């Protein structure tokens, strides 16, 4: 006797299907959540975020749990409660997503709604744990999206496979089972791969964080010089904290380089090619200096400009060790991610603070700002000088290479233009009649600001009071106290630098070598 299965066996399999009907749905829910989790882990690792959404939830749980409970848990499990809370969060996630899966067999819409609600919780947790980057919600949002799409694929298959096979449907039932198991298997593999990849990325991020922590007491931050801050509310602080320092780069994923793995290759038109280590730089002794960095893409009145105390080693010293050929006129610097800048050799060797910087405001550079080593050059826009994650200096001639932005229509040379900005009042503000502090910042790095003037309506230009200028390389605060009268007024600002040049009123766009024009605002006084 062959082929035909005895009815008894079909009955058994049928009743077992009935009994474990919910099982398929639950599995679909858990696998959907697992894939969403894996994708969110990969994204947060790739975006170099301190915590992934799940860890953010765990940290939030620790945050809102009463201290006494936390202490009790710590006394039970030892000093570190975090792994336990993360494990519990994952168990909770598994249970909830299994329930979501079961629900999905009845109502997919309701199940998706629960996933969406979980997404809201993740976003709220991330919001309370991360503040730095605008892409911080991406892992949670994309992760939940992936979980929802996956559920919409698995749920109908789970429903089909858990249908009781009735007479003549055995073949169809086997096919349904194959469909479900195939899809579920593929999701399981993807989930495993993304979770492992996410964890690997997080580990390299954690290694960099640990290396930065070890360096926490290596650097010095100069005391803030007297008189630089005029104390006007709303005017940019003279020193910008590293966390709010403007950021501009083409790196989709921040390079993660450990100091011990870092090497700087110096080559090209030199007597001897050299290779410099992080320790070599520390051993040379660090210079601390103030410098305002700004971006060529900064519009008039824009905020792509910040000031910090940097610690580093003069580029000139490194170049001297390699022995620069007299016919060279440029240095091409390359980042570990392949980005390049071209800097005039003269700016690197004329005695200004052109540096290989290791620290900002007494702390190792953050990964976003170029850890472990970047270049900074007073008087030049970032795109021609401030290479982050620096790994290569090629001594060369401008005629022999082109850098990343000069290949895209920007000027090969990028000296900073003398500029000034109004920080208060804001454009469109409504003010009360009487004394109003008009204030802001002005900069002419490596030349210095001599004078800032304010122009109100068609009155003559009046001279603003300036903050002190401990170095010509940093911006200066300015303030003018104005006796505001009723009406709508236009306010303009212009700076004169130490070369005697007064900012032009001619409006130029940021391309190809920096915007010009006077920052102008309108205010209403009543
Ligand atoms: N590797 C790398 N370095 C880079 C860039 C970049 O895209 N990649 N951008 C440059 C530009 S255009 C500017 S304005 C500064 C900005 O430095 P910050 O992000 O630390 O403020 O970095 C410069 N260094
Ligand atoms: Mo820039």
Image (cartoon, grey):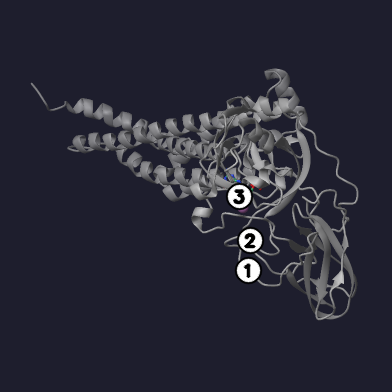
Marker disc for residue 508: 1
Q: Do the CB atoms of the residues marked 1 and 2 lie less than 8 Å apart?
A: yes
Q: Is residue 196 above or below residue 386?
A: above
Residue located 28% across and 34% down the image: 177
Q: Quadrant of the C terminus?
A: bottom right
Relative to 525, 131 lies left or right: left
Marker disc for residue 384: 3
The image position of residue 319, as x and y in percent, is 64, 35
Relative to 196, 525 lies left or right: right
Marker disc for residue 514: 2
The answer to whether any part of residue 132 appears in the image is no
The image position of residue 57, as x and y in percent, is 62, 37
Q: Secondary structure at mark 2?
A: loop
The image position of residue 38, as x and y in percent, is 48, 35
Q: Secondary structure at mark 3?
A: helix
Q: How many angstroms separate mark 1 from mark 2 (CA)?
A: 8 Å
Q: Residues within 10 Å of mark 2 (few under 14, many from 20)?
A: many
Residue nearer the viewer, 137 or 420: 420
Q: Secondary structure at mark 1?
A: loop
Q: How many angstroms separate mark 1 from mark 3 (CA)?
A: 19 Å
Residue located 50% across and 43% down the image: 143
Residue 395 quadrant = top right
Q: Do the CB atoms of the residues marked 1 and 3 lie less than 8 Å apart?
A: no
């Amino acid at each position: 006797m062959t082929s035909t299965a005895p009815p008894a066996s079909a009955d058994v399999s049928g009743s077992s299907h009935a009994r474990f009907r919910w099982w398929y749905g639950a599995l679909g829910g858990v696998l959907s959540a697992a894939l969403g989790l894996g994708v969110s882990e990969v994204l947060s690792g790739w975006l170099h975020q301190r915590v992934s959404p799940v860890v953010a939830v765990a940290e939030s749980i620790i945050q809102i749990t009463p201290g006494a409970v936390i202490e009790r848990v710590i006394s039970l499990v030892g000093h570190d409660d975090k792994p336990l809370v993360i494990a519990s969060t994952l168990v909770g996630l598994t249970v909830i997503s299994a329930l979501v899966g079961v629900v999905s067999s009845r109502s997919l819409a309701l199940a998706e709604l629960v996933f969406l609600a979980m997404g809201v919780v993740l976003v709220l947790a991330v919001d309370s744990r991360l503040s730095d980057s605008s892409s911080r919600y991406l892992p949670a949002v994309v992760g939940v999206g992936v979980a929802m799409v996956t559920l919409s694929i698995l749920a109908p298959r789970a429903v089909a496979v858990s249908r009781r096979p009735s007479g003549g449907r055995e073949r169809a039932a086997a096919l349904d089972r194959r469909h479900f198991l195939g899809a579920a298997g593929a999701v399981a593999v993807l989930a495993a791969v993304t979770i492992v990849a996410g964890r690997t990325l997080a580990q390299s991020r954690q290694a960099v964080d640990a290396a930065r922590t070890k360096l926490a007491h290596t650097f010095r931050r100069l005391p803030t010089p007297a008189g630089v801050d005029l104390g006007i509310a709303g005017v940019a602080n003279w020193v910008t904290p590293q966390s709010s320092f403007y950021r501009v780069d083409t790196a989709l994923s921040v390079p993660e380089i450990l100091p011990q793995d870092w090497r700087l290759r110096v080559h090209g038109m030199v007597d001897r090619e050299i290779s410099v280590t992080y320790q070599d730089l520390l051993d040379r002794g660090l210079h601390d200096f103030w410098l305002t960095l700004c971006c060529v893409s900064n519009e008039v009145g824009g905020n792509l400009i910040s000031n910090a105390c940097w610690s580093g080693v003069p580029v000139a010293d490194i170049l001297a060790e390699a022995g620069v050929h007299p016919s060279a006129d440029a240095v091409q610097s390359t980042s570990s991610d392949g980005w390049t800048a071209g800097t005039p050799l003269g700016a690197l060797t004329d005695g200004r603070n052109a540096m290989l910087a290791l620290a900002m405001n007494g702390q190792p550079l953050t990964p976003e700002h170029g850890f472990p080593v970047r270049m900074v050059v007073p008087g030049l826009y970032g795109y021609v000088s401030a290479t982050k994650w620096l790994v290569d200096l090629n001594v060369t001639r401008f005629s022999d290479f082109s850098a990343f932005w000069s290949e895209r229509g920007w000027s090969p040379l990028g000296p900073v233009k003398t500029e000034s900005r109004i920080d208060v009042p804001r454009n469109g503000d409504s003010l009360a009649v009487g004394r109003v502090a008009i204030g802001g910042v002005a900069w002419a790095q490596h030349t210095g600001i001599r004078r800032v003037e304010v122009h109100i309506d068609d009155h003559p230009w009046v001279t603003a009071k300036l903050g002190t200028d401990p170095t010509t390389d940093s911006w200066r605060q300015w303030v003018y106290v104005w006796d505001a009268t009723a009406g709508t007024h236009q306010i303009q600002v212009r700076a004169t630098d130490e070369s005697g040049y007064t900012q032009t009123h001619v409006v130029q766009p940021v391309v190809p070598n920096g915007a010009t024009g006077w920052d102008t605002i309108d205010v209403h006084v009543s």
